[in-house]
Amino acid sequence: MDRRKFLKDSALASSLMFVPSFLKAFESVDSIRLGYKRLVVVQLAGGNDGLNTIIPYNNDIYYNSRPSLAITKDIIRMTDDLGFHPSLVSLRNLYDNGELSILNNVGYPNPVRSHFRSMDIWQTASDSHQYLQSGWLGRYMDMHGNKPYNAIEMDEQLSLAMKGEHFNGIATNDYKILHRTAKDPFFKSVLSHYNDAHLSEHNLGYLYQTMIEAKSSAKYIYENTKVRLSKQEYPQNGFAKQLKNVAQFINSNLDTKVFYTSLGGFDTHANQQNKQARLLSQYAESISTFVKDLKRNDTFKDTLILTFSEFGRRVKQNAANGTEHGAANNVFIIGKNLKQSGFYNNLASLEQLDDNGDLIYEIDFRTIYATILNKWLKADDKEVLNRDFEKLDFI
């Protein structure tokens, strides 16, 4: 097989390329560890409007700033001051059970309002002026992972958050397709040349090794998941499908510590109300079903769910019945036996905004990461995040 044909055909393997290059090929399945902690990350991509998600329904400034965009009907009143968007009704039981903690005013110093740059900051845990090439979860897996399937993202491409300095996870939106792709005759043809002395020294050696490891990971995921397919009925949307696959992985006791999922479409510059209502409904209904699935299989107690968005939205609505890019936002933590459930802190003042008309952040998002790393994943958070951050008390 010549180089040109190899590179041309390797497009077939694109979904399998996100794995480390330094591991040896493995086909045997290690004994599966039970009861260790798993983290599920949910990214609300586009910048969810936190002020219409957690609503200060007694605040006149909120209504005056959003004359046609403020939520006025069917607010789910949780405290004397704050309520849920009506589309979050499915999260009410989690809140009442002490399984949901809501952190308000989460952000970072000198906030950036570019989607791509702010997402990089959240995914790498960098300062706003700092550019890192590895993600916070990837760096965690550098220290605590040794197989590609230790970290799985439910997408065709791997996020920066999941890329370490030495370790990358697996990216797939369908583990069955991943398995079928790995069994394609193309792989057998390519791998049959791996021991050829000339090609093994060729600069394509990295790709060969990657394919070997991906093939083994695809087999491991498929073989260990197919016997524990979910019996829970999920909503019919793409985000719910991601969570259903994650639930199957968790309930099958895959040796996976980190799962990454996303729900996009939150960049609501125009006609926000209906769009956000639909997306929040998908989020809440899918998460509620996911938790039920885990509880049914007694795996919820060892699972923590983190939901974030790269920034919030401006307090004042715009002329198109939407909102512009903002700064501080809310973060949801879902899990069993949370130390502080409900609202972790009050909403920032709507009277004292920053120079751009945004909520002023109170909680640095990296303190949330540090808390999860230290208290949940039992990792050295300072080593992962490259500095020491305060630990919070939600877990």
Image: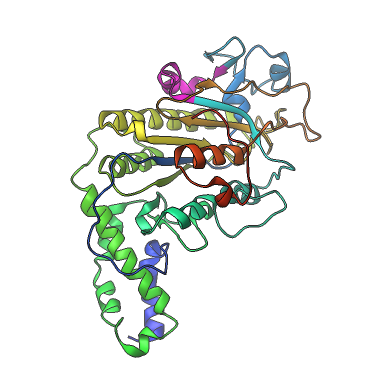
* Residue occupying the far left of the picture: 227
Residue 366 located left or right of residue 8 = right
Position in image of residue 302 (x %, y %): 36, 35
Q: Is residue 93 magenta?
A: yes
Q: Residue at x 62, y 14 (%)?
A: 57
Quadrant in the picture for residue 236? top left
* Residue occupying the far top of the picture: 80
Front-most of residues 257 and 104: 257
Front-most of residues 385 and 81: 385
Q: Residue at x 40, y 52 (%)?
A: 151
Q: How many marks?
A: 0
Front-most of residues 196 and 83: 196
Quadrant in the picture for residue 72? top right
Residue 191 located left or right of residue 306 = left
Residue 91 located left or right of residue 296 = right
Dominant secondary-structure state across the stretch colored magenta: helix
Q: Which residues are magenta?
A: 83-100
Residue 158, above or below 242: below
Residue 220, above or below 336: below
Residue 319, above or below 253: above
Position in image of residue 27 (x %, y %): 24, 64
Q: Can residue 271 be seen here?
A: no
Q: How is the image coloured?
A: rainbow
Q: Residue at x 50, y 58 (%)?
A: 164
Quadrant in the picture for residue 371? top right
Q: Can residue 155 be seen here?
A: yes
On-image quarter of the N terminus: bottom left
